[in-house]
Amino acid sequence: MRRPVILVLALGILASSATSAFAAAPPPPAQTYEAESGLLLGKTRLARENPDGTGRTFVTGFEHLGDGLALAIKTPAAGFYFLDLGYACGGDKRIPVSVNGRAQGSRFFPKTTGFGEARYGRVFLDAGDNTLRIGTDWTFIDVDFIRLSPAAAPAPFHLSAAPVNPHASPEARQLFTTLTREFGRRTFAGQHDSNPGSLPRLKTIADLTDGAAPAILGLDLLYYSGTWNHPDGDGAIETARDWALHRMGIAQLSWHWLSPGGSREPVWDSFSTLKTLFDVDRLADTSTPEYHAVIADLDRIAEKLKVLRDARVPVLWRPLHEAEGQWFWWGARGPEATKRLYRLMFDRFTRVHHLDNLLWVWTSTDSPAALDWYPGDDLVDIIATDLYAPAGMTGVSSQPSTASVSSTPAANPSPSANAAPYPPSPPPPPGSGSSSGTTSSPARTSTRPTLFRQSTVILAPLPCASCNLLPPLR
């Protein structure tokens, strides 16, 4: 079975296991660090489990930016370690961790009854002294202890040789080849901008970097949705075309697809599950009004995408993102309904409209259920993730409001993912006087092949050819 491309900021140094002529040495035992032994940051404080002052001691007060806990960790050897957290929380939370100043990501932890224990994931620790910091994201957690145990290095990645569409255009194939060729070697930075007319975020980057620009420009087709009923949209298609042809960059398009029917006011917010009565599960019956409404919307968007196809512009096409969160209507009825819609779109765009300039990006989250929603290797070129840095987080791995294709050698330890508590608010309608956009952070290592991800890592000065970006490294 073919494997989709993985473009991911990989976590890691391959941990070598000590061996002898007779047998491998046993792994070092797990190390447990009590929270009360750490340095309290911000307004965190010690507390007792029981009102009478008995029971375990834990750290509480994770309520605001800057509230945290720093623990001094000493490890016998450099390598990967599993991090487990003893904690309590009254609802599902995300808890951010950094190691030696490198952001590791804000990971999901489920609601507990009393204190429980759950695995954060794999982190890379240096030999000797390390500092592990637990920060604040979704607030109101209690931390009892952390436990570290030796872990294997991340599995190697296997990249596909060609796009999933056998009729992919030469430009799409060349872009695909560039991304796979540079995997593990270079990082392409990018920026999403919610205002395609003036691109204010790109101007800010240029001002801060003496004229540099990202290689990738991310835009959204929200205002081309049929429900919005503005044939010319907001200019995103034309801006993507100009970005590729005149500024020699890579175009990435998302689609906050306004509900094809049953929208509640305001219409421009109807991609939200809470703002529509549309039932995506009814697409299983091709005679339903829902099915015909979806086909009409797909055909409408396809006509817009043909502008890019005819201009020979390859596109990183990123539809139906974050479906497993179920906050968008396309994910509201579960994974099978979403995969059915994705397959319908793929078939309509490739077989009917011949949009052979698209590279298909499946965008997920770090939800434990994410793999249940995956459409399949035959439909996906690039597996992606939307991950969001907690407010105020800084560092190479967590700059805000960006999009990039990343590739970092597995021989270098790197930060991992940060995740968001809810989908970002949409930009208001054109002319409303303000705008807002997605804030995203680097993706964490995945055991599947994959990533187009959103994050600022480096900036590439223009020009930057969209199909043959850089000469091979020597």
Image (cartoon, rainbow, N blue to C red):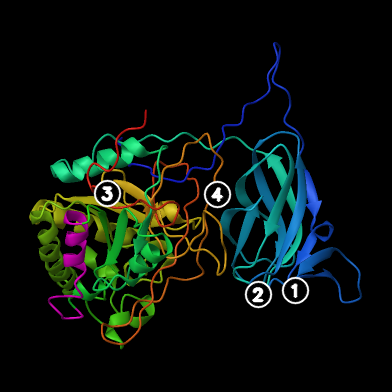
Q: Are marks 1 and 2 in contact (CB under 8 Å)?
A: yes
Q: Quadrant of residue 162?
A: top left
Q: Which residue is mark 1?
A: 43
Point out which mark residue 64 bears: 2
- Of the image marks 3 and 2, the number of the one nearer the N terminus: 2
Report the Cα–Cα distance between label 3 and label 4. Answer: 26 Å
Q: Residue at x 72, y 51 (%)?
A: 131
Q: Name which residue lies at 36% across and 71% down.
A: 328
What is the CA distance from the residue labelled 1 to the residue labelled 4? 26 Å
Point out residue 6 in the picture as x, y percentages from the top left corner. Answer: 38, 42
Visible in this render: residue 276?
A: no
Residue 326 placed where, x, y %?
41, 68
- Sequence-wise, the earlier of marks 1 and 2 is 1
- The reply to whether the magenta stretch includes residue 8 is no
Give the numbered dot on residue 415: 4
- Left-right relation of 110 to 178: right
Mark 1 Cα within 10 Å, few/some/many (few <14, many 20+)?
some
**Mark closer to the observer (1, 3):** 3
Q: Quadrant of residue 221?
A: bottom left
User: Residue type at mark 2?
Assistant: His
Q: Residues within 10 Å of mark 4 (few under 14, many from 20)?
A: many
Q: Given the image, on which type of amino acid does mark 4 rest?
A: Pro
Give percent across and percent down for residue 281: 29, 67
Q: Which residue range is magenta in the image?
A: 227-246
**Comes first in the chain, label 1 or label 3:** 1
Looking at the image, is mark 2 or mark 4 earlier in the sequence?
2
